Image: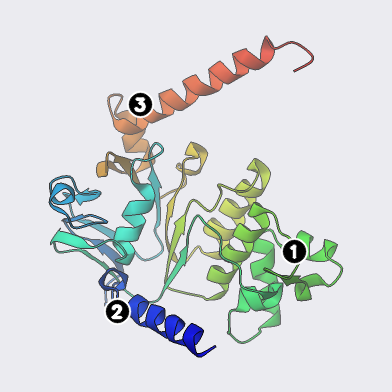
Amino acid sequence: MIAQTKVSVDRIKEFVKEDQLKLIPSHTPKQSNVMIVIETGEYAWKTSDQNLKNPTIKIVEKIETIKGYKVAICGSVGSGKSSLLSSILGEIPKISGVGAKVYGTKAYVPQSSWIQSGTVRENVLFGKEMIEGYYGDVLEACALDQDVKMWEDGNLTVVGERGMNLSGGQKQRIELARAVYSDSDVYILDDPFSAVDAHTGTHLFKKCLLQHLSLKTVIYATHQLEFLEAADLILVIKGGQIAQSGKYEDLIADLNGELVRQMAAHRKSLDQVNVGVSHAPLWC
């Protein structure tokens, strides 16, 4: 046990001293309505000579996000959506430039859901005080109220390693509810609709993002183009850079723009799937 304890302590020391885990410090909110400032800069996961020449994320233009804005980040697979969010959080080392600033408290929902061993209520509250009415509103906004009603123990159902098995969508919604209940100033969501069906995704977008978080600043990455039109600002990512930025109406008006290309490719892939389904034999 002494040997195991020493190994554990050494690993904890190594983890705490890791330079790459220095997140962006919290900034005091400004008097103005600006909540997120993305300055010019370059970011790379590893600061080797090769990565310095080809950074993971490169910001060439300053972007400011106003309080209450909903900012959508879209792009193809591997274009750098998650990396851009990580650069805003300060998880990717900055190799040049000014960097990003986030004013006020932050709540982050990653793609890989994390659930702690305990009850559903404990996962949502995450140490905060229980407020019955607000707690119920959060469950409804995150489409968890129906799940809770179906479980025998309700929100006291134990989940995690020794608890009930949850689907990927349920884990993601619990994680989203945890962030929403924190009542933060800025919400950074990494594709919160990826593990749910289309109906539930629409509910999360309308009830949670647009209604419950209507007064909050939300920046979310998504590959579902139907969630872009309601955004106040759209950032189109290509090859680790922001290829386009602006309102939905302005971006689709540019017929040679990157967003129009992505929408055309998405439409083409759907047409190919529909054609394949219509001509498939019955036994398929």
Q: Residues within 10 Å of mark 3 (few under 14, many from 20)?
A: some
Q: Which residue is mark 3?
A: 261
Quarter of the image where the C terminus is located: top right
- The percent position of residue 242, horizontal first and vertical second, equals 26, 44
Q: Find residue 70 and report its image quarter.
A: bottom left
Q: Find residue 86 and report its image quarter.
A: bottom left
In the displayed structure image, the side of residue 270 where residue 43 appears, left or right = left
Q: Which residue is mark 1?
A: 145
The amino acid at mark 2 is: Lys
Q: Tell me which residue sits at (12%, 51%) in the image.
A: 49
Q: Is residue 10 above or below residue 32?
A: below
Quarter of the image where the N terminus is located: bottom right
Q: Nearer the viewer, mark 1 or mark 2?
A: 2
Q: Secondary structure at mark 2?
A: loop
Q: Residues within 10 Å of mark 2 (few under 14, many from 20)?
A: few
- The percent position of residue 36, horizontal first and vertical second, equals 30, 65
* The label number, if any, that marks residue 17 in the structure image: 2
Q: Find residue 122 and report its image quarter.
A: bottom right
